[in-house]
Amino acid sequence: MMFQKEMTREAQETVPVWEMVWGKMKQAVQRSKEQSLKGLETVFIKWGGILFIIGVLLGRAVLLAELFPFALPFFAAVYAWKKEKSVIAAAGVAVGTFSGAVWHGAFIIAGIAGFLVLYEWLKRYVNKMSWALPAAVFIATITARASTVWLAEGTMTSYTLIMVGVEAGLSFILTMIFLQSMPLLVTKKRRKALKHEEIICFIILLASIMTGAIGWVIYGMAAEHTLARYLVLLFAYTGGAALGASVGVIAGLVLSLASVANLYQMSLLAFAGLLGGLLKEGKKWGVSIGLLIGTALIALYGDGMSGINLTLAESAVAIGLFLLTPRAITSFIEKYIPGTPEYAREQQKHAQKVKELTATKVGQFSELFHTLSKSFVAKPLSGEPGGGYVSNQDELLSQITEKTCQTCFRKETCWVKEFRKTYDGMDAMLYELEHEGKIHSRTKNQWKKHCHYHKRMANVMEEVMKNEQAQRTLREQMDESRQLVADQLKGVSVIMEDFAREIQREQEAHYWQEEQIYEALHDAGLDIGHVDIYRLDEGNVEIEMSVPKEGGSDHAEKIIAPMLSDILKEHIITEKEEGYDNISEYSNFKFVSARDFVVDTGLASVAKGGGFISGDSHAAIDIGTGKFAIAISDGMGSGEKAHRESSSALQILQTILSSGMDESTAIRSVNSILSLRSSEETFSTLDLAMVDLKDASSKFIKIGSVPSFIKRGGKMKQIEASNLPIGMMEHAEIEMIEEQLQDGDMLVMISDGILEIPGPIENTEMWVKRMIAQIDTNDPQELADLLLERVMRMSHGEIHDDMTIMAAKISRNMPKWAAIPVRKTVPLKRKRA
C-alpha cells in the first residue's frame, strides 16, 4: 500500500512536468514558425528575392508569340519605387529573357539602358513626374525594338512598325499598372485599405507573371492553366463571386493574348470564378466544387469528351494546391479586400485601437486637470477649523513693539519686571481692535496708567492692524480665485472624463433589432431604405432610417414615429431630416425618444424710449444635456453698450453650459470673465432658470435680478435671492434656489424695468404678482403680451427703461400622434437608461 501511494504521488507530480514540457514544445514550435516567416520575409521582401523571381517570369512572358512588353515596365516600376533593388530586378529580367528567347536579349538590354538615360533626363525637365516614367518606357521601347529589328533584318516593314507601336503602347499601359501594384511587393508596411483599381492592377500583374510559365508542361498539363485556376480559386474564396469572376476574366484575357490556343480560357476561368465565389459559404471545398463544375461545363462545350480529362486534371492539381494553402495566406489577402469579414475585423481592430488611444489621451488630460484642480484648492492656514484667517498675535505684537518699545526708556521695566501685565494689556487692546474695530475707553485708561507713550502705542497698533486686515482680505481673495480656478478645472476634468467614458463605450451591434424593425415596417407597406440603430436604451433611443422624399416628412412624423412608439413602448418623435448627396430619391430621418416634459416660451420686450436696441438680452435654449435654460440679462444702463454687455454674458453662459459644466461653476466663471475683461465699471444682472426635462426639477440663480414668479393654478409663488450683479465683483457668492415644477406650471421672469414703472403703485412686486394671477391664459406668449400691455397702460404709454418679460409653460410631453400598432409583436431586447 505504501508503494502504491508513492507511485500515485509520483504520477501526480509528473503531470505538471509533462504539461510544462508540452507547453515549452508549443512555444518552441511557435517561435520557429515566427522565425521562419521572418526569415522568408527577409529573403523575399528585404533582400528582393521576390523581385528576382518575378523578373525571371516576366522576362519569359510573351504576347502574340513575338511581343515582350512586360520586362521593361517591371524594371521601370522597381526603379521608381526601390532604386537600390533595381539591379536585382534587372538580373531577374535578363535571366528570364535569355532562358526563354535569347534573340530578344539585345532588345531588353538596349531598352533598360535607353530607359535609364531618358528617365533621368525627363526628371529634370518634366514637371509632372507621374508621366515621366511611362513616357520614358514608351520611348525606350520604340527606340530599342526599332533599332534591334533594323540591325537584325536591315529593313522595317509596315507590319513591323505596327507591332513596334503596339508593344510600346502596351508597355506604356503596363508601366502605370505595375506602378499601382509595386508597393504591395517592395514595402513591408502596407495600407490596410486597397482601392478596387489597385486590386485589379495587382491581379493584372499576377496574370502577367503567369504568362512566364507558358511552355512548362508536366504530364500534358500546362503550368499556366493550373496557376490561373489556382489564382481564381484563391480570389474567389477570399473576395467572393464578383472578384473571382473579375480575376477569371483578367487572367483568361492575358493568357489568350499570350497564346491564341488559350482563347477559351477566359470564359472558362470567368465562369469558374463566378461559381466558386457563389459557393464561398461552403469554405474551400465549396469553391473547389464550383471550379470543377465550371471547368467541366466549358470543357465539354469546347473540346467535348476528348479534352475533358486533361482539363479536369489541371483543375484537380489547382484544387490540391488551393487546399494546401495555409489559412495565414488567405487571411492576409482578405485583409486588403474590402467587403470581406477579415477586412472588416482588421478595420474594426484599427478603429478600436484609435478609439482606445483617443480615450487614453482624453483620460490623461482629465487626470491632468483634476491634479491641477487639487493643487489650486485653498488650504486652511491657521486658526479656525473652517480655514478662516486669524491673526497671529505674537507676530503682530512683535511688529508693534519694534516700532514703539524698542526706543522707550522704560523697556526694561515693562518687559522684564512687569512682563505679564504688559503682554496682557497689549493683547487685550489688539483683540478689541481686531474684533470690534476700536479700543474701549476703559481699556485705554488702564493702559494709560501703565504705558508712558500710550497714544503712540494706540496709533501704531491701529496702523499695524489695518495692514494686517488688508493682507488678510487679499489672502481671502486669492483663495477665492484659487477655488474658482479649481472648480473650473474640476468641471473640465469631469467633462473630459465623461467624454473618455463615452469613447470607450463599445458600440453595440443591433443587427437583429434592425432586421426586426425593418420587417415590421416593411410588412406594414412602408418603403424603407435602411434602418440603423445607434442607441436602444429606454428613454435614450436614436434610430436613423431612409424614407422616400415624396411625402417623407409626413410619413416619418405621422406613421413611422407612431409605429416605432408601439414597437419600443415609448414616445418616439422625428428629430431632423437630412438629404443624401448621392441618392436623390431618399431622405435620412432621425428618430429619438421624446422628453418627459417640454417647455413652451413666450417673449415680450421693448427698449427704453421706444428705441431699436434694448439693454436687455434673453435666451431660451435646449442646451443638449436634457436641460432647458431660460435667462434674462440686463446690462447697466440702456442702448448698444448695455446690450453688448448683457448679450456677451448670455453667450458665454450658453457656451459653458452646453459643454456640460454645472450651473454654479458656469455662473462664477462668467462673473470672473466679465469682471476681469474691462476696467470700466460695467456689470449686468442675470436671471437664470434651468429646467430638467426628465422630471421638471428646476434651479434658479438670480444675480442682481428682480424676483421671478411661478403660477400654479390660482396660486402664486415668488422666487428671489440677494446676489450682486454679475461682473461687479470678481468674487461673488452665488445662491441657488431649487424648485420642483409640475405639469401646467407657468414661469414668469422679468427685468427690473417692469418694477420701475412710474405711477401711484407703492409695491410694484405685489402688483405684478397680482396681474399675473389675474391673467387667465395657458399660452405663455399671450401671458407675456398681456402683462406688458398692462404695464404700459399703467405707465401711460411711456417707456422709462428697457422692459423684458419671458413666460414659460412646463407641460408633460403628450404624443402628437397616437401609437400605431404593428401587425405582429416585435420582442426587442433593450437596456434601461
Image (cartoon, rainbow, N blue to C red):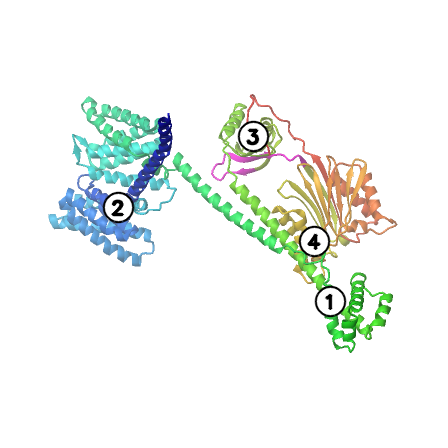
| Three-letter amino acid code at the position of disc 1 | Leu
Q: Is residue 180 visible?
A: yes
Label 2: state its secondary structure.
helix
Highlighted range, magenta: 577-597
Front residue of 663/35: it is: 35
Upstream in sequence: badge 3 or badge 4: 4
Q: CA distance from mark 1 to mark 3?
A: 70 Å
User: Dot 4: what SS?
Assistant: helix
Work out whether mark 1 precedes mark 3 in sequence or the reverse, and give the earlier one: 1
Q: Give yes or no for contact between labels 3 and 4 (Cβ–Cβ under 8 Å).
A: no
Q: Nearer the viewer, mark 1 or mark 2?
A: 1
Please report contact status of discs 4 and 2: CB closer than 8 Å, yes or no. no
Give how far apart the Cα atoms at labels 4 and 2 are: 73 Å
Residue underneath mark 4: 646
Tell me the mark number nearer the camera, choosing from 3 and 4: 3
Q: Amino acid at mark 3?
A: Arg
Mark 1 or 4, closer to the camera: 1
Measured in 3D between alpha carbons, the distance from the residue under mark 2 to the one under mark 3, in whole angstroms, is: 54 Å
- Label located before the other in sequence (1 or 2): 2
Q: Marks 4 and 2: which is nearer the front?
A: 2
Residue 396 disc label: 1
Q: Which mark is residue 830?
A: 3
Tag 2–tag 3 contact (CB < 8 Å): no
Q: CA distance from mark 1 to mark 4?
A: 46 Å
Q: Label 2 belongs to which residue?
A: 43
